[in-house]
Image (cartoon, rainbow, N blue to C red):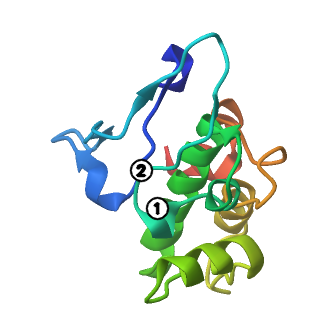
Amino acid sequence: MHAHDIIHRDIKPENLLITAGGHAKLADFGSAMVLEGGSDVINKSAGTPAFTSPEACVEGDYSGKAADVWAAGVTLYMFAHGKVPFMSPTLVQIFQMIKEEPIVFSPALSAPLRDLLERLLDKDYTRRITIPEIRRHPWMAAEA
């Protein structure tokens, strides 16, 4: 999807479907955006607040692809922990937590899974793992 300059903008467990063959498929492209001009810089957030990247919690431009990677990280975190990393009754509090609070990881996680989650959920989008790097990550190879 990113290779075709499309960003989803609402990656979360509810938007994942599993095929009979066990492959995950992304659904609900209602918030998706086709990028133009070879840039993935956007300035309007969409999607579910708990899956919003830190850079999308403030006004200004940010990388739509990096924001999708963050949301995929929150999704994987939810599968591993049974909850999202940040939740609060108000949108303002959720965004503040996403921007400022550290992420707490279960000590029961394998080292490769924790490393992948830390890289997916790097609050600095310029250091966040990319899709090609995710595909080569040891946890992905171990699970394949």
Residue under the point 68% across and 84% down: 104
Residue under the point 30% across and 36% down: 29
Q: Which amino acid does label 1 sit on?
A: Thr
Residue identifier under label 1: 75
Element carrying mark 1: helix
Q: Is residue 74 above or below residue 105?
A: above
Residue at the outermost front position: 59
Counting every numbered tag in the picture gives 2
Where in the figure is residue 37, as x and y percent of width and height? 63, 10
Q: Do the residues labelled 1 and 2 touch (CB within 8 Å)?
A: yes
Relative placement, left or right, of 142 versus 48 is: right
Element carrying mark 2: loop
Residue at the outermost left position: 20
Is residue 134 visible from the viewing direction of this image?
A: no
Q: In this view, does 60 lie above or below 73?
A: above
Instruction: Return the disc, 1 or 2, that comes first in the chain's sequence.
Output: 2
Q: Nearer the viewer, mark 1 or mark 2?
A: 2
The quarter of the displayed image where residue 41 is located: top right
Q: Which amino acid does label 2 sit on?
A: Ile
Where in the figure is residue 20, as x and y percent of width and height? 15, 41
Residue under the point 63% across and 54% down: 56
Residue under the point 53% across and 19% down: 5
Q: Is residue 10 above or below residue 131?
A: below
Q: Distance between the residues labelled 1 and 2?
A: 7 Å
Residue identifier under label 2: 11
Q: In this view, does 108 lie above or below 98?
A: below
Where in the figure is residue 80, as x and y percent of width and height? 49, 73
